[in-house]
């Protein structure tokens, strides 16, 4: 994927995920789900999302919510991961000293560094299932985002725009165009 395509996907997903909560497509008309296309922060076109794009949007919202839930166990151990990482870095710096033409290695400190690294590895291993679930969900989000992105591109085909706002039945009106962000 080129940088431009990756940035487009990221920009669309960011706008979508920052959008609104999940709403059932069968109970809402497509007029409740709109795409607002902007060029240089000027509204160029507003189109109603079609049924497939609404479903992709809702799938993306649901997957995002699931990712937030999956991230919780990792968030809970993040301080420990950071502490172990900092300890490893500090012990490595103390254990290996360059003195002019000499390299001095303190084996005692190096063993301490290895012990801390083993503790970090054990913590990661305890949560490997959580990391795997996040990776799997991230892949799923990427697939859903591509489906949503393609649907948006199809619906806005022939329109020259650099930003998109997704409006849903529950979205607020706090969105502001950012002249520094461009979708290519």
Image: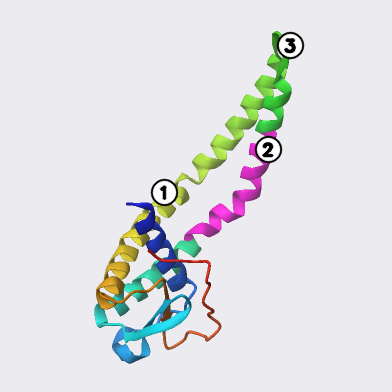
Q: Label 1 to label 2, Cα distance in Å?
A: 24 Å
The disc label shown at residue 100, or none? 3
Chain part drawn in magenta = 70-87
Q: Label 3 to label 1, Cα distance in Å?
A: 45 Å
Q: Are marks 3 and 1 in contact (CB under 8 Å)?
A: no
Quadrant in the rendering for residue 92 = top right
Seen at 63% across and 38% down, the residue is: 85
- Is residue 72 found inside the magenta-colored segment of the image? yes
Location of residue 68 with respect to 78 vertically, above or below = below
Residue hosting label 1: 132
Residue 16 pos. (x, y %): 43, 73
Residue 91 pos. (x, y %): 70, 27
Q: Is residue 74 visible?
A: yes
Q: Quadrant of the C terminus?
A: bottom left
Left or right, residue 170 beside residue 97: left
Location of residue 76 with respect to 177 vertically, above or below = above
Q: Label 2 to label 3, Cα distance in Å?
A: 26 Å
Quadrant in the rendering for residue 52 = bottom left
Q: Residues within 10 Å of mark 1 (few under 14, many from 20)?
A: few
Q: Secondary structure at mark 1?
A: helix
Q: Going from the N terminus, do you reach mark 3 or mark 1 first? A: 3
Residue hosting label 2: 86
Q: Going from the N terminus, do you reach mark 1 or mark 2 first? A: 2
Closer to the eye: label 2 or 3: 3
Left or right, residue 154 beside residue 136: left
Q: Are marks 2 and 3 in contact (CB under 8 Å)?
A: no
């Amino acid at each position: 994927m080129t940088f431009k395509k990756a940035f487009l996907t990221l920009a669309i997903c960011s706008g979508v995920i920052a959008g609104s909560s999940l709403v059932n497509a069968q109970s809402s008309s497509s007029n409740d789900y709109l795409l607002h296309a902007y060029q240089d922060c000027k509204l160029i076109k507003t189109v109603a999302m079609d049924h497939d794009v609404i479903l992709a949007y809702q799938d993306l919202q649901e997957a995002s919510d699931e990712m937030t839930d999956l991230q919780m166990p990792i968030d809970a151990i993040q301080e420990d991961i950071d502490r172990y990482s900092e300890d490893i870095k500090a012990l490595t710096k103390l254990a290996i000293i360059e003195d002019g033409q000499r390299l001095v290695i303190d084996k005692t400190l190096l063993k301490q560094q290895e012990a801390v690294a083993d503790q970090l590895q054990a913590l990661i291993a305890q949560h490997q299932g959580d990391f795997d679930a996040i990776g799997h969900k991230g892949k799923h989000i990427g697939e859903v985002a591509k489906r949503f992105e393609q649907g948006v591109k199809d619906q806005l085909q022939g329109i020259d725009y650099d930003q998109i706002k997704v409006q849903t039945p529950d979205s607020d009106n706090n969105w502001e165009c950012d002249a520094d962000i461009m979708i290519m």
